[in-house]
Image (cartoon, rainbow, N blue to C red):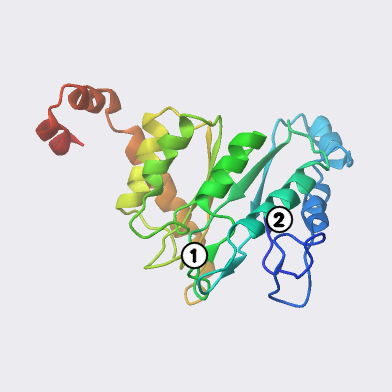
Amino acid sequence: MGSAFLNMLSLKDDEFMTGYYYERRPVSPEDGRAVFRYSRLDPYSRVFDTQLGQMRIDTSCLVNIWIPDSFKDIPADRLSPRLRLKKSLDEILACGYNKNKVTVAVESKVFGIGVESYTVGSNEFYQNYAAKNNICCLLDNGHCHPLEYVSDKIPALLAFYDKVALHVTRGVRWDSDHVVLFEDELKEIAKEIVRNEATDKVKIGLDYFDASINRLSAWVTGQRAMQKALLYALLMNHDELKKLQDEADFTALMVKG
């Protein structure tokens, strides 16, 4: 379940998420708390737990929070919006939720079209917030600089987090959400998940949409590409490749890798 606050900017510090205006309808921390209630996963709703008990199913849900507040040009104040966002997130999480059934994640973004200069929920902001509050970081490989690679970020987070969430997409020059294909970065993402024995730790979500093509075909193509990448990684001899790296045999590593 995702809670993307697409129009949350307002002028009142005490009421809204980061405190600037963008659209007429304001969004407050209460909208975030409602996501937990509507998910039927928090302690205030017994529906989900009751149904799971009847079906004897052990499962959970990841609730991801993404907030795209940002500026087109150089801001005069970078700190205050982040302090307001921190306060709003604290209020959302304080509502109480079933931590056995819900994993909360926060998702950063480096920039967007029309908001190139500053994003409140930057990678540094959310990684620190997640670490301090014992929640999950979500990495979207379309939300980074084009020369950054999420495959490199996965093991960095695994050193500190029990869980890492992903939005796997295919950005073309920016966060364009093209249909996922079996290409180099997808293979590297899958290899980092498998070689670090993190298939139970990394939560994979696919994030793409293209209204110019058949949607069923797009859905199946992207799903199959992710499955192929994981199978490709599972078939590799990672122990041998690690040994070559430790022995500084980089020629053999290049050939066999």
In this view of the protein, can residue 228 be seen by the observer?
A: yes
Is residue 2 visible in this depiction of the protein? Answer: no
Instruction: Residue at 78%, 74% (x, y): give it.
Output: 25
Crowding at mark 2 (Cα within 10 Å: few <14, some 14-19, many 20+): some
Position of 3 with respect to 145 (left or right) is right
Image coordinates of residue 29 in percent, x first then y, are: 79, 55
Q: In the displayed image of the protein, which residue is found farthest to the front? A: 76
- Above or below 32: residue 202: above
Q: Is residue 80 left or right of residue 141?
A: right
Horizontal placement of 248 versus 217: left or right? left
Tell me the crowding category of disc 1: few under 14, some 14 to 19, or many 20 or more residues within 10 angstroms, Cα based: many
Expressed as whole percent of the image width and height from the top left, the position of residue 215 reads 53, 68
Label 2 amino acid?
Arg
Q: Amino acid at mark 1?
A: Phe
Mark 2, residue position: 84
Q: Is residue 85 left or right of residue 206?
A: right
Which one is in front, 92 or 139? 92
Residue at mark 2 to residue at mark 1: CA–CA distance: 19 Å
Q: Which image quadrant is residue 134 in?
A: top right
Identify the residue position indicated by label 1 in the image. Answer: 111
Closest to the camera, between mark 2 and mark 1, is 2
Q: Earlier in the sequence, mark 2 or mark 1?
A: 2
